[in-house]
Amino acid sequence: MSAKRIGIIGGSGFYKFKGLTVRDTIDMETPFGGPSDALVLGELAGREVLFLPRHGTGHRLLPSEIPFRANIYGLKKLGVEWIISVSAVGSMKETIHPCDVVVPDQLIDRSRTRQDTFFGSGIVAHISFADPVCPVLSSVLATAAESCGARVHRGGTYLCIEGPAFSTRAESQLYRSWGVDVIGMTNYQEAKLAREAEICYTIMACVTDYDCWHETEEAVSVEMLVSNLQKNASLAQRTIQEALPMIPERRTCLCANALKDTILTPADRIPQETRRALDVIIGKYVK
């Protein structure tokens, strides 16, 4: 089995991973509180995997209630170097249909109340986030989804909104005028925190609906979502099993050293409490 752990974050409708050989269930606390749920450690397709349901088992957490920092910190502390994040999204383009898969390469944030950095409390760092997802992992995921029979869109822009309400029609039309491809409520914060933690990150955006802009389609409803969520969850699990053996053992992408030369605060000016709390994140650079 590989010594490199792969994190899988399950989104709406994806709370358990069928086929995962469970070795342990890990409850943990981090400097940012507890993760969304216990992390499930197991083996799948010959790789060591940590699975975390983003909204908690039973879907208990609103998008704005998700402890994003605790989730990514916990995965980092447990040795995760790759994260595949599965999310339900709405399509913002006619050519992207319900039950299609989008592997976006750009993100826009329109949320308002989220914590999306590990830094502060006496330490300042500025990561590069021009290309917010890992190109290597994204390519692997797209190839795996295609081999599972999915209609896959490689690249595109994911718009993250606050939620939990869906967009108004006016908002939906505004976002379409920006040229975005899909809309969701969770992935921007995960991507930024994963980059700060030097974890490769990609998104399997599973389309459930056309949002509310499409005049010939009914507006998004919970009933529509549930039906497509079930189909998408099954596809996501098959895709991930296909992708895992293709993930390389050694990372050559920029994600692996994303914090290099980004911490502006001199080591002797960083408060000891902050240094201890962030050792999992900054210990490689701050001695």
Image: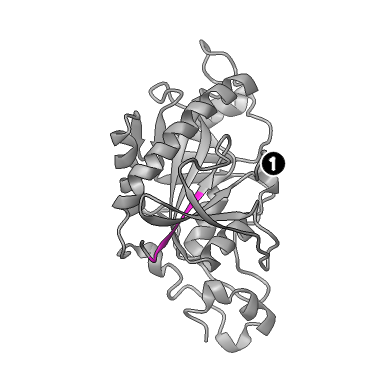
Residue identifier under label 1 = 62
- Could one spot residue 26 in this view of the protein? yes
Task: Check the image and report above or below for 100 versus 83.
Answer: above
| Residue 212: image location, x then y, percent | 57, 21
Which residue is at a point 30% across and 34% down the rendered structure image? 146
- The 10 Å Cα crowd at callout 1, few under 14, some 14 to 19, many 20 or more, is some
Main SS, magenta region, reads: strand
Residue 55, picture quadrant = top right
The answer to whether 34 appears left or right of 188 in the picture is right
| Residue 66: image location, x then y, percent | 66, 49
Q: Is residue 208 magenta?
A: no
Picture quarter with the N terminus: bottom left
Indicate the secondary structure of the residue bearing disc 1. Answer: loop
Task: Check the image and report above or below for 262 versus 184.
Answer: below
Q: In front: 84, or 275?
A: 84
Which residue is at a point 52% across and 28% down the rendered structure image? 230
Which residue is at a point 31% across and 47% down the rendered structure image? 140
| Residue 282: image location, x then y, percent | 53, 75
Which residue is at a point 42% across and 21% down the rendered structure image? 94
- Could one spot residue 178 in this view of the protein? no
The answer to whether 156 appears left or right of 7 in the picture is left
The residue at the far bottom in this view is 268
Q: In front: 221, or 254?
A: 221
| Residue 53: image location, x then y, percent | 59, 46
Q: Amino acid at mark 1?
A: Leu
Residue 200, picture quadrant = bottom left
The residue segment tinted magenta is 3-8
The residue at the far top in this view is 216
Task: Count every numbered label the image shows and give the total.
Answer: 1
Q: In front: 163, or 29?
A: 29
The answer to whether 44 appears left or right of 173 in the picture is left
